[in-house]
Image (spheres, helix red, strand yellow):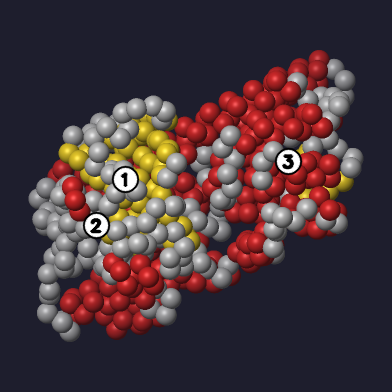
Amino acid sequence: MHRVVASIFVALLLATHSRAEDASAWSREKKRAYAEAIVERLAVASGEARTPPRVRISKRVNVAVFWPDQLVIEMDERTFDLCAKGPVPLDDGLAILLGHELAHFYGNHGWLREFGNDLKPGEFSDRLKKLSDDNRLAAETEADYFGAFTAYLAGFDPVGAAPKLFRAIYAQYAEMPGYPSVDQRVGLAEASDTRLRELIPIFEAGNLMVALRQYEAAATCFDRIAQDFPSREILNNAGVARAMQAVGMLPSDPPPFVYPFELDLDTRLRRPPVVSRGADDPAWLARYARLVREAQSRFEQAIARDPDYATAYVNLAAVYAMQHEFDLARAFADKASLLASRQNLHATEASAEIVLGIAAGDQGMYTEAYSHFDRAAKVADALATANLQVLDTRSGKNPPSTQPTAPPAIQPAAHEIESVGTVSPASPDLFSTAPYQTAQIRSVRAFEPDIQIVQKSAPSWSGYRIDLPKLRWVILRTTTEKTRNELGAANSTEQIRTAYGPPDAVVASRLGALWVYSDRRLIFEMSDKGSVVAWYSYSCLTR
């Protein structure tokens, strides 16, 4: 089953589970299908190209085992039943355990033990088996960490859950030969949980920095995540952040086309005016070339991890179009379109048409460009319309007009910033008292920013303080409070648009999209079903 089609099946299957239903009473086949749907969802989030292992439910193993020779994850039925009734929600418990075994598969953790066991007795065999045993603890730790972060990316809630789950598992099984002790196993889970708590704020800060057009800071965040979790999506995001920063440097004469980098679809396309600079400014040229080169490198790395990753192909095509390498831009756009068509990724097909239109338009082939943009408009109306307007100006159909510009990153009057309940993101002492989590990213290159991220939670909100060299962003997120207009979670996109108009930007997020209203300092987090999940209020101060 194709990954995209399978993800639809996953959503339908998981949606049928009711918390009131006793999943331990299901048939073994229904349990297997449910667990396999969890694995499929984890596999999509991991960004790996390889088809994930099948799932088997039996009573022949303890807990769960990945069999590398069979490409099967086998789970004990008693473990499934424990998750159904256990100390954490069923989906989260299964995601932790199955994500762990999936990490063994993607990390090739089975080969040392299997290879060593296949050798004849002898000194080399003994040494290899010892090496396997010595590395087992490291592999288990890595699998805990990668599995938990994959579960988070897939929309589950693994933070703090694994230690509770493992204590319940050890209480259920009287003997677990070959496994660490309960204290050792819980210790591994707690160590992984600590690392996960450090990584999640960096990931979320990267997404928010993209939404707020702080692309250099976003690239730094994604690069840090890629050190631990170099999935295709993280590499792609790091490339998009750099490409969008380069796009922001393009001069406004002639008006630039709008490139379809899939992480950031700017609907009103408001960007600060750029003073035309080019060959007469070596520093500008060097910075622009570096950003484009590094974006291209990240997209190529993403493709290397998954040769069928259509999104990275279309982003790479756009980067080549920016460099006026039009033959390469067309070749990669055609490849992206072919892959997207096979995978039913209609938005990516439209993005490929946009790139082809940009390539034609930049070469003065206006009739061809109109044709590509018109085809893209069937799916990507806002993006295609914006490029058609640019094309009208370039081809002489409409006289040049001054585009509206983005409001500067300055603090509006205090009464204009939305409070979350009684708390304002403009409060100077909001993040000065414990408890809070901190994460720091130290730059290794002079042009990259040092970043400090402080995360804090309260009963009605959670928030981040993101300190850049010259700016301090304070961002509060809530699912329970209402805005001044009495809007919040569960309201529809239509209601938000009626109250606030079209957003400045629509940015892809982990489970939907972020609608950004920069003049109001508001962000709405939308689900893929078209409703509000949460909303953010933010402030920005000069440091």
Q: Earlier in the sequence, mark 3 or mark 2?
A: 3
Q: Earlier in the sequence, mark 1 or mark 2?
A: 1
Pick out the residue farthest to the top.
Answer: 123
Mark 3 element type = loop
Tell me if label 3 and label 2 are in contact, CB under 8 Å. Answer: no
Taking depth in this image into account, of 535 and 52 the one nearest to the observer is 535
Measuring from the top left, give residue 22's x and y in whole percent.
78, 53
Which-is-in-front pick, marks 1 and 2? 1
How far apart marks 3 and 1 lie (CA) works out to: 37 Å
Mark 2 element type = loop
Crowding around mark 3 (Cα neighbors within 10 Å: few <14, some 14 to 19, many 20+) is some
Residue at (19% x, 51% y) in the render: 415
Residue at the spot of label 1: 422
Residue at the spot of label 2: 520
Q: Residue type at mark 3? A: Gly
In the rendered image, is residue 435 in sight?
yes
Taking depth in this image into account, of 363 and 41 the one nearest to the observer is 41
Mark 1 element type = loop
Q: Residue type at mark 1? A: Thr
Residue at (63% x, 65% y) in the render: 8
Residue at the spot of label 3: 86
Q: Earlier in the sequence, mark 3 or mark 1?
A: 3
Measuring from the top left, give residue 402's x and y in whole percent.
12, 69
